[in-house]
Image (cartoon, coloured by chain):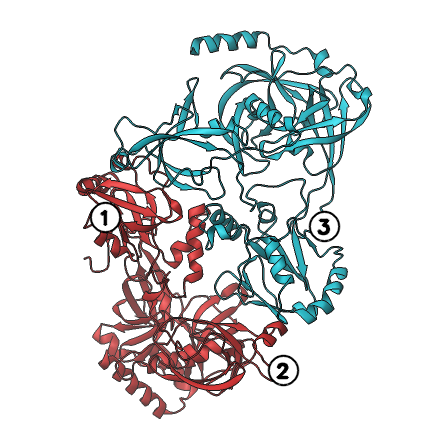
Chain colours: A red, B cyan
Amino acid sequence: MRALGLVICSVCCLCFLSGVSSADDLMPRLRAGLVKLRVNSQGYEQGQPWNRAAPTTSTSRGFVVGPGLILTSANNVRNHILIEVSEANSVRRYPAELKHVDYRAGLALVEITDPELRARMKPLELGDPVKLDDEFDIYQLGSDNMVERANARVVRANASSTRLTLRLQASGLAGGTGEIAVRDGKVVGLVTGTQASKQQATLLSIESIRHYVKDHDDGKYAGLPGGTIWWQPLLRDDLRTYYGLNKDQHGVAITRLGKDQTGHGVLMEGDVLTKIDGYDIDDEGRFTHEVHGRLSARYLLFGVKYAGETAKATVLRKGNPVEVEFKLKAIVPEKRLVPPTPVDTRPEFMIVGGLVIFELNISLAKSMPRSPGGVVIRRYREHATWDPPVDRERVVYVDRVERHPSNKGYETLTHAIIRTVNGKPISRIADVAEALKTPQDKYHVFTFELDEVDFVMHAAETEKINKALAERYNIPRLRYLKGDE
Amino acid sequence: MRTLAFLLCLAAAASAGPDLQKLNASIVKIFCYSQPEDYSRPWRSDQAFPSTGSGFFIGNRMIMTNGHVVGNERQLMVKRADRSKRYEARMLFAGHDCDLAVITVDDDSFWEGMEKMEIGARPGLQSTVACIGYPQGGEKLAITEGVVSRIDMRNYVHTYGDSHLTIQIDAAINPGNSGGPVVQGKKVVGVAFQGQRSSQAIGYMIPPSVIRHFLTDIKDGKYHGYPDLGIVFQPLENPTLKEYLGLPKEATGVVVLKPLPFSSVVGHVRRDDVIHAIDGIPVEDNGKIKIDGEELDMAIVVEGKQVGEAVTLTIRRDGKVSEIEVPLKKWAARMKVSLAYDEKPEYLVKGGYVFVPLSLNYVIRQRRGREDLLYFLRQYYLSIYKDDEKREQLVILSRVLPHPTTRYRTYANSIVSAVDGKPPRDFAEFVKLVESATGELIKIDFEGVNVAPLILDKKKLAAVNQKILQRNGIVQDRHVEKEAG
């Protein structure tokens, strides 16, 4: 990865030195810098993760940012199994490999492996930020790989925690992702979504693109910082009185801080956050950006700097201004009670005596039925970005029971959160596997939350039953835990 | 025995033809003008509406009908089939949990020539019955015949929260039929009460056992309702589970998972007790008992008892079998998990904030967040709510009335967790905590992550409360049933 970083860095430097390009040589440069990606993807079936989902094929776009390196939207390579690229004016496809992806940044680097194509493709220069009402062109490779152009204008800026995006009004958009915005011969953004019928598009800003590309400079990708900092707007008079703000003081009240995450131990619950890195925070939790106007203050914390850097803030603590400085820590999705849906990897699962056991993730939680058990599990989504409770790292639950004579009487056991197995508390799905190594007398005993029924099976018969289940239900493997092959 | 029963049924069916002349003097049409309460805006009632149903004379100047025919009544009228005059009537007793009621008429002339109908025995399966009443609002008695096709425990939809023995017949029961007698020979063998929209020609009637239970209950001049045993149990269909619990192979029954708080079994039955028999009747592994060859829920034994009577359970605890007597009481939980009628909803309007106790009546009125509220009801029902038995009722901030002092409020159905740090035991205590707060600011906290507390400034409240009440046409700022202790 170090070599990759250095190469991109040198390309960027060269680009900056080359100055403004003339419009006359734009089309040749676009033909050498625009690519089309054809990605075959294949995830896993949500309800039966022992099976792969049906493969899909998608077409998207990207552009060259370094020797043989293509920048594209992260979603374009989600669950990829095969990536191919083609250049302008040719429909011939060449193999490529995913070099790096960051789903929070929304960007990915794909490397061209064919030496001849690598040699032909030339990086496009990165330009300066565009702002409200700026007009520019959108370029892409069309269905026959001819370069197509549309015209666009910025109608508003928007910042999430990690990305600065621009909404475009565009004419002549074909629809798709990975198209590039070009002004003065330089790339000023990457289209991440279009609504062709409304002639609207979302553009990932050049600021966010530069942030991602620059992160590879030293060969160590730090990534975006993250963490759980919940705050409340202070628009309401009663809350302003409660937090002791006068009419000239503004900010947001911090209500929760994730344990060991960004700001924890420095910022305090009950602090009123009034300033971050010199920017005033208003009562809605926004700051005024020099170019883009009012944006979410979370972007200042998690979208501008790199994990490991520091931020300075001013808070009102019991009415007194206090200057604080804290480290912006890398986010660890693994530590979430309900983590994001696994991408590019098989979800963990176990089947024991017919019990189909999952760890809850966001998409499983969203798809829970409206049954009582389902509703209870859905509520754990509230904690998706919050600290796991002390006694539980994940929500491990029985999704259903695949029927077998040995589990007669348990047919209605669904969406039941496992409390213990063989007397041992269950915090992760791996704990289930560990607990099964030491049966309770000669039995495996599962207990559940909500006083669901206890599940009991003969430990000695587990293997035989599991084998029979695998044959009966055509299950190629009965478990996948991290570390399994 | 089975043969004998069948022959008796045939004999009854042979003489099933009802005497229309006598029926005209026994069965009345009921005109009800009812007005439900608006649990979303509890200071007001909904628009009143007319409906009709059926009823029949059971002696002692009493007409029996369904609870749902006369629920929330503002005016009751009855009309005999053999007379044109409508008489004013009034409610005597309503048992909404079993969907039965009796009404009376004060005008002596109404009763002249009325023929009393006797309550008979439960009809056998496949026997023919006649359903008599005024379906679809007609002026003449309508008689439809059907066959008894199923007898089992079923939910009574009038309250959603109660289940009792129900007889299914293959005759359509239409609006207006409700409350009418179902007869076999000359005797009433059921009260028509609900149908099934998804199926044609399937109707349900309340069996004689439930009718008699109701009539016995009201003998002391008050309706007490059905007692509940109050256990959550696990069937013992799985042989491994039986073995694990150390039960002899021939033993049958169910294992107790949880005695419900506020219920009859608290202090008598514990988790892991095995119930082998109820009132000497063996309990099968699926939780059913056999009576006269028919398999019925074990709850049927409790169904036959009145509040204050006792049931004998044969239980196995720590390997020892013993008989225990459980005095039966009505489930004493104050949170309403069944729909209530003829009651005025509780509420408190404070500074534009409307607080109500959580109830099923409230939940079914909500368009949004219904699932979450049902979750809380279920949590409460199973008493796994945070403070379990210390929280007899949950209090919700249901809506915010618009006023300059209530700007930016986005609360909807937020559950109150504490008033000035103290969790309210019930709605009455919540009101008391708010009214007796000593500080200038009252802090009300809510369940869930990142829900800002509500800060009520007592001085401001005093200034605006009356104006907000007037603007919204609220005469009383509260209705509280019980004084806080």
How far across and how far down the image is residue B309, in percent?
52, 29
Disc nearest the viewer among 2 and 1: 2
Q: Is residue B33 visible?
A: yes
Q: Nearer the viewer, mark 3 or mark 1?
A: 3
* Residue found 17% across the figure and 41% down from its top: A460
Which residue in the protein does label 2 denote?
A247
Q: Three-letter amino acid code at disc 2?
A: Lys
Question: Separation of disc 3 and disc 1 at Cα?
Answer: 59 Å
Instruction: Please tell me whether residue B165 is drawn above or below residue A382 in the rendered image.
Output: above
Q: What label does residue B396 carry, if any?
A: none
Q: From what the image shows, is residue B9 above or below residue B94?
A: above
Q: Which residue is mark 3?
A: B44
Q: Secondary structure at mark 1?
A: loop
Q: Quadrant of the N terminus of chain A?
A: bottom left
Q: Is residue B8 left or right of residue A482?
A: right
User: Picture quarter containing residue B89?
Assistant: top right
Dot 3 amino acid type: Arg
Q: Secondary structure at mark 3?
A: loop
